[in-house]
Amino acid sequence: MEAAALGHFVSGLDKATKVIIVSNRQPWFHERVAERIRAFRPASGLVTALEPIIEAVGGTWIAHGSAPADRLVVDRKNRVRLPEDNPRFTLRRLWLTPKEEEGYYNGISNRALWPLCHLVYTKPRFSRSDWETYRDVNRRFSDAVLEEAGSSPAIVFTQDFHLALLPRFLREARPDLKLIQFWHIPWPNREAFRIFPWSGEILDGLLGNDLLGFHIQNHCNNFLDTVDKSMEAKVDYENFSVWRGGRPTFIRPFPISVDFRQIGIDAGLETVQAKKEGFLAQLGPSAAGTKICVGADRVDYTKGIPERLRGFDLLLRRNPDLKGKVTLMQLAAPSRTQIEEYRSINDEIEGLVEEINRRHGSEAWRPVHFLRANHDYHAVIAAYRMADVVLVTSLHDGMNLVAKEFIAARTDGDGVLLLSQYTGAARELTDALLVNPYDTDQLADAMLQAFRMPEEERRQRMARMRAQVEKNNIYEWGRKIFEELLRRVSFGKGRDAAGKSPRPHPAAGRKHPYLAVVKYLTYRCSSAILGKVNSRLPGGPA
Ligand code: F6P
């Protein structure tokens, strides 16, 4: 499926229905550059994936306006049409006070939920006043959605963990809204989740949705198990749904992707070529003719950047003949710098880079170039085009779109992807060199294997990965989500896609202890079997 087809599909659902996307991160931010205000796309997997979708379906995107010049371009209702050169959707900005930003974004979203959901051994931190702010800000997003929807029917497509309470608020105010949410990060097992002090409210909020999506089946299983063990709700393991307050929420895996075709087109632009030359100039003459490894990440402790550097260090220690023949270029977008763990991961990385360069480098050759900046989209594509090997070594990642963007950019059919087995992407990209990033020896071995891989094998692997990303592109992801919504809820005159009126689930509000036990055991057996199958697949359980 391509952009136009998705737009056509969604507008055909019901002409009167508005589409509203809601997220914390905005798809474009505005900044002053030499007396002019310019729009930029932030470093965000969510934006990479959703921006093409909103362009295809039109509608309104509501998000936090967080950049210095954001207020200067909006109208009286805080709206701006985007993209600048060919406007296709409306961005409605919502402003937060520093206190709101601290409690809702830094506090609950990034000090609590982020480490709670990523199993990377960073402790989550909780604060009741942050929680109250998180609730208030979710309420403010709800007010903005209701204002944008007016009295029209609307599909509200909420993104991520910043807005877990929003669907319940919307459901209470407008029971007729069609509510979808996609959770862009992993959902942990219930033992990990249960330490969250307000877990009941988070789950109840999410169960305000009609449809709740995760990247992979394993996260869906974890979610159902968490709900089943911690709250009053009817979990239907056959249909993968939860009934609460007489309504179902369907839980489904939708592996997210990128705009394969567009990235391929953009990879051929002159701007990209110019950025590539800029990088080569920055790396200096000593990098010319060396094998280039590229990493492109937000500076985040989940991304495994120190682990990658240690693997590279070990590679050079074990293979001194590689000195002067390989270069690691790490693009690093500063992220969440108000949070202590993010500042210390940055210091750790800078220390490691210095150490490796001191240990192995010479006057003529620098092994690691750490380019800490917000590199724009074209620069990142240029880096992928330069790479002999791209390194994705996340310790835990819902999907990881760097992997898919790299593949989409390689229209020349060459390049090797070294990919952590703890990413959602590893389920689909089995032709990557899959690694456990905690295992430094394995990382060094895999890097060597990547450098030595014969061209024919590189091309075969890349061709298979390109076919996979082309097939499951971002529009296909969108189509599957909207199609599932269509299947599950009624559109227009109180009828669903099959022409039936919605009926309450037979088990809703009643208790069938024996049936529940049988269903639960069936689920446990099938997830145990699935677990076994998964653990034998490359990638293992996420
Ligand atoms: O994909 C997870 C996510 O938190 C997105 O929601 C977000 O856009 C991205 O990572 C980058 O993080 P942030 O928006 O906090 O900069």
Image: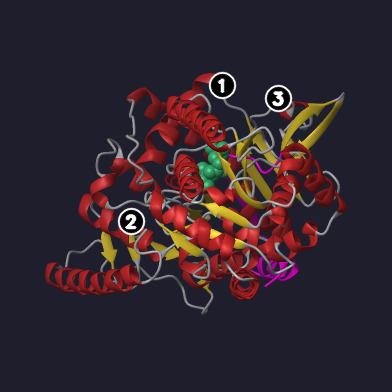
Q: Which numbered dot is residue 67?
A: none
Question: Which image quarter: residue 13?
Answer: bottom right
List x then y, in percent, for residue 472.
59, 70
**Alpha carbon separation for disc pair 3 and 2:** 38 Å
Q: Secondary structure at mark 1?
A: loop
Residue in front for this viewpoint, 327 or 93: 327
The structure residue drawn at horizontal position 44% and vertical position 24%, both measured from the top left corner, is: 340
What's the residue type where badge 2 is placed? Answer: Phe
What's the residue type where badge 3 is placed? Answer: Pro
Q: On the image, numbered disc 1 is attached to which residue?
A: 97
Which residue, as the protein is rendered here, is positioned at the far bottom? 498
Q: Quadrant of the N terminus?
A: bottom right
Q: Quadrant of the C terminus?
A: bottom left
**Label 3 crowd (10 A; few <14 / some 14-19 / many >=20):** few
Q: On the image, numbered disc 2 is attached to which residue?
A: 223
Instruction: Identify whether 122 is placed above or below 495.
Output: above
**Is residue 253 shown in magenta?**
no
**Alpha carbon separation for disc pair 2 and 1:** 32 Å
The structure residue drawn at horizontal position 24% and vertical position 57%, both measured from the top left corner, is: 228
* Pointer 2 or 1: first along the chain: 1
Which residue, as the protein is rendered here, is positioned at the far front? 321
The picture quadrant for ligand 1 comes to top right
Magenta range is 1-28
* Pointer 1 or 3: first along the chain: 3
Question: Which image quarter: residue 155?
Answer: bottom right
* Pointer 3 or 2: first along the chain: 3
**Alpha carbon separation for disc pair 1 and 3:** 14 Å
**Label 1 crowd (10 A; few <14 / some 14-19 / many >=20):** few
Q: Which numbered dot is residue 68?
A: 3
What's the residue type where badge 1 is placed? Answer: Thr
Instruction: Identify whether 58 is placed above or below 31.
Output: below
